[in-house]
Every structure is written in C-alpha cells, then in structure tokens.
Amino acid sequence: MATVHSTYWLSPSRHTVVSRRSDVFPQVRMVPRTKVSQRLVPRAGTKVPFAAPDWDLAVRLAKTRKLMAPRSDWTFQNLIWRFSSFVVLTLVAMISKLFMCFYADTEVVNRDTLVDILDDRVAKPRPLITVANHISALDDPLLWGFLPMRQLLDREKVRWCLAARELLFTNPIATTFFTLGQTMPLLRGAGIFQPYLDAAIERLNRNKWVHLFPEGKIFQTSDLGRFRWGVARLVMEAQVTPIVVPIWHSGMDKVMPMSRTFHVPILGQKLKVVVGEPLDFTSLLARARAENWPVTTTRALIAANIKASIKLLAKEHGD
C-alpha cells in the first residue's frame, strides 16, 4: 500500500486548501507539513482569501508567511484589469504583426481556416483548442502575427496559452504581465490532473480559445516529441467537445536557436505556418462512452490523432 503523506496543496479552481493522498494525485505545489506550515496552512476544506495573480504559493508562504490563493477566473474582472490586459495584448499584437510582416520572410498556408473559425465562434460559441509543434521560445506570441489585427485586439478572440510556470511566472512583475497577456501557468512534470489544467478546462467551458504545445518543451529537430496527454484531457473533460486545430510551423528555430549563448532574435529568417483542417472528436468520444473504452485508451487515441495531423502537415509542407 502506498504511503500517504500529510501534506496540503491549494486548488486555484476551488479556492480551498485540500488534503490529497500522494498515491492518487501528483504532488503539485505541495507545502510540507512543517512547524511553520502547520501554523500557516489550515485544515482541508478551509476557505481562503483571493489574491491574484500569485501562483507560486509555496515561495510566497516561505517569504511573507501569508496564505494566498488566486482567483478562479485568473483575472480581475474590473475596468482597470481589463484595460491593462488590453494594453498588454495590443503591445504584443503589434510586435508579433511587425515581426511576421517586416522582419521575417513569412509564408502562411490555409490562414483563412483559423480566421473563419474565430469569426464563426461569435455567432455559434464553441470552445477552441489549437496545438502546434514547439521549436522556439518565441513561438507564442509571435506565431499569431498572421492573424488580422481586428482579432488580435479582441480579448474575447485572443488565445489563452499554457506556459511553463518555472520559466515565465518567476516573480510578481512577470506573473502579472503574462497573466494580463492571457497566459496561464503549467507545472511541467506534474501530470495531467494538476489544478492548472483544471483552469484551462474552465476556460474551455466558457467557450474560450486555449492554445498549448503538447510536446511540453522545445524540440529544435525535424522529429516531433512525445505528445503529452494533457491535450486529450482538455478534449475529454470540456462540457462541449472543443474544435481542435493543428498547426505546424518552421523557421522559428532559426530565429531563436537554443545553441546561441545570447538569446537575441535573428531577423530576416524564412518562416512557414501551416494551419490544418479542424478536428472534431465528438463522434470518437460518443463511441468511447458507448463501448466503454478505458479512459487511458481514449486519451492515447486523441493525442495520437492530433500528433498524426501535425506530422502530416510537416510531411506535406516541409522543405
């Protein structure tokens, strides 16, 4: 029988401190039950106050000895926050647009597919997931420079992107900036049942657009890395089955090669972005429920189908 540790974690989607058995839930954002944490962390189920954005709770506990938990919707829904978010999104959109149009030789294939989907979702709301290969730290947000400005400046049409918490959400200033830019943290290595993916599912349940890189890290090679099952969980657990749009792109690895000591973008590179046809897993999920497939089988099949779609785009449009 697995050992059960006396530890607690904070759930950003439930605003409560919850005790979890370590043998059934990955130890994400765990606070060891030390003499200090016994005074700071209440018993399971205790309500805690809001404070956003502050995702690195364990560090904050150690430094300030205050108990904090982020808002469930990951934003302040007030005028100041919305205006600040608009300013950040506008700045990022302008940089992405300028880069794709003037500082790179960009070719976009099947651009209208994604543009039309974003427009059609206004009249017929449906959650959207985009997935892409990950070849550079600049993939997001520069990748979206091919979209029209009217969509890049509309907060309701801008993607929510999952990004590595340990790389981007390192201090309060960076955390605030990336949250204003509609980026959510993801704890790599913590499994598919971490609270951050709960927040992504919550976004999908509000018919938002969520973008992620299923490889989980940068691969500057011709081969795709292993696709994690987190994307399959998003597809399976959203209230309405999302549309999944695969995207393959190349050239960003030349803009920001990992081999360079100084990470400065190299301008004038040839970029190619290919938008694939949308995938609808509604019938597959219905069959899985009807035939009582194991959950792991369904997850593996969804992840494999998405990877195969991106691999096919690379084969058809790669140099």
Image (cartoon, helix red, strand yellow):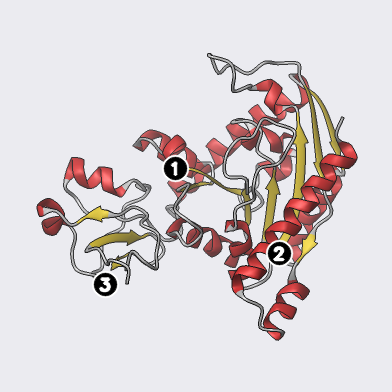
Q: Secondary structure at mark 2?
A: helix
Mark 1: few/some/many CA within 10 Å (<14, 14-19, 20+): some
Give the residue type that dot 1 points to. Answer: Arg
Q: Quadrant of the N terminus?
A: bottom left
Q: Which mark is residue 165?
A: 1
What kind of residue is marked 2?
A: Leu
State the residue position of label 2: 301
Name the N-terminal-most of marks 3 and 1. Answer: 3
Q: Which quadrant of the figure has residue 147?
A: top right
Farthest residue in the right direction?
316
Q: In the picture provided, is 282 more to the left or to the right than 113?
A: left
Q: Secondary structure at mark 1?
A: helix
Give the residue at x 36% y 55%: 70
**Image height check: is 158 above or below 287?**
above
Residue 138 visible in image: yes
Marks 1 and 2, Cα distance to the nearest angstrom?
Answer: 28 Å
Front-most of residues 300 and 182: 300
Which residue appears farthest toward the bottom when viewing the image?
A: 290
Comes first in the chain, label 3 or label 2: 3
Residue sitting at 54 percent across and 58 percent down? 200
Residue 204's x, y, as percent? 60, 63
Q: Amino acid at mark 3?
A: Gly
Give the position of the C terminus as an image quadrant.
top right
**CB contact under 8 Å: marks 3 and 2:** no
Asked if one can make out residue 146 in the rendered structure from this viewpoint, the answer is no
Residue of label 3: 45
Q: Secondary structure at mark 3?
A: loop
- Mark closest to the chain's N terminus, 1 or 2: 1
- Please give the name of the residue rendered at 39% of the width and 68% of the height, measured from the top-left corner: 24
